[in-house]
Amino acid sequence: MFPYLPTTDAERDAMLHAIGVSTIEDLFASIPKALRVAGALELPRPHSEWEVLERFRELERGNLDPEATISFLGAGLYRHRQPTAVDALIQRAEFFTAYTPYQPEVSQGTLQAIFEWQTLLCQLTGMEVSNASLYEGASALTEAVLMAERLRQGNRVVVSAGLHPEYRQTLRSYLASYPLEVIEVPLGPDGRTDAAAWRAELERGAVAAVVQSPNFFGCIEDLAAAIPPAHQAGALAIVAIAEAVSLGLLKAPGELGADVVAGEAASFGLAPSFGGPLVGFLTTRDAFKRELPGRLVGQTVDAEGRRGFVLTLATREQHIRRAKATSNICTNQGLFALVATVTLALWGPVGLRQIAQRCRDYAVYAYGKLTAIPGVRAVYAAPFFNEFALELPREAAAILGPLAERGILGGVDLGHWDRDRKRQILVACTECNRKDHIDRFAAALSELVK
């Protein structure tokens, strides 16, 4: 068996001598003995590479096979079909470049992929500029709010209660060290942001007004009505998108007046993977481009007039003028942005619209089948895209467990985020579902709620 650390005793002694100490323990002399662990750590015996792999396979066997399971999970992360060609295309040599494409002459593949990502996201959201992707939707939304803080005067951020609870939690964590107050506006009876409360809070002033559409409960917000009050208050109107496939059917937020559109693009070819890794996006108007976090790739021509790509803007803390950086984002989810870019290119605008329409059609069919079950009712009446909330006759956990045993992941328990919603579930449909899946779900749920 090989040691975990590949250095020999002689090599370690040489390194200690170079540092100027006699033993490894000398490196920790500044830590009081009372704070050090005495004796050996209680760790399991060492395992070989093959034993570790077998242990992981054993753990994996406890998971439900997504290809053999009927899933209606959503709540911000959606399973969509990835074109078979994606895996082959993302492994092409031109995309295997250095960690950061500082040298454009050797990074044209990566730079062009980022440029195409930016172009596609602008087309989808109706905005003018996109950055080179971010970690995931929650931090992308938070970076959008921090943009507003730099661009506008004030100390209030008005947020719809329809914004994903984990996005709201991330926002509050980031803003804990900022002189900004986060004001949440409740939802109305139909599941959309209460219009009167929204206007009233914005009349008191704000740097940013944040609304998600479709919102966390699947309801399509009236952006045409929600955005003007934000502008009247002098705030940036920020629209969050958690299910990016919805942009294949719904009008682009930029066309409705949004100043920033940020969210999650994992629906474009990424598997749910137990919650990540993901890929966030942030698009905005040209006037605000110098406040974008991360970096921006631009198109140019070389000395011979040939098309080429370069880092046009990189306002990151990693660079020389770090004191003036707009963000501490010092990387982007390049591989996953590449997956999303290739997926969107293969789908094309017609394909995206067809997929979005199929998601919507299956959701409408499921809504009708499930709400027809005695004891099951819709929580909200607002229009939805591919997701909706249901209330069950008893706690969701008591029903979702037996459903999973039958090979059906019947939605997300909303009690996870809100104790008052323990009898509610969030059901999502994508093109991965079929009518027979929905029929099986409805039949099983009908038995379990009796």
Image: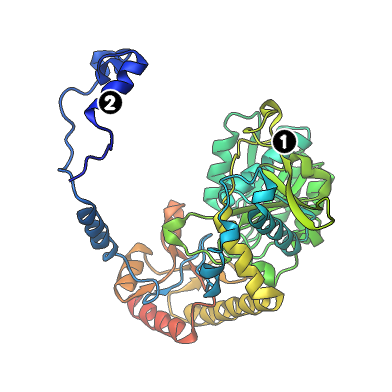
Is residue 61 toward the left or the right of residue 134 in the image?
A: left
Image position of 306 with respect to 68: above or below: above
Q: Earlier in the sequence, mark 2 or mark 1?
A: 2
Is residue 125 toward the left or the right of residue 287 in the image?
A: left
Mark 2 crowdedness (10 Å alpha carbons): few <14, some 14-19, many ≥20: few
Of the numbered discs in the image, which one, if any, rests on residue 245? none
Is residue 111 at all visible to an observer of this figure? Answer: yes
Disc 1 element: helix
Q: What residue type is labelled 1?
A: Glu
Q: How is the image coloured?
A: rainbow
Disc 2 element: helix
Nearer the observer: mark 2 or 1; the answer is 2
Mark 1 lies on residue: 149
Image location of residue 108, percent across then percent down: 68, 54
Quadrant of the image containing the C terminus: bottom left
- Is 67 in front, or is 348? 348
Mark 2 lies on residue: 12
Image location of residue 114, percent across then percent down: 67, 55
Alpha carbons under labels 2 and 1: distance apart: 50 Å
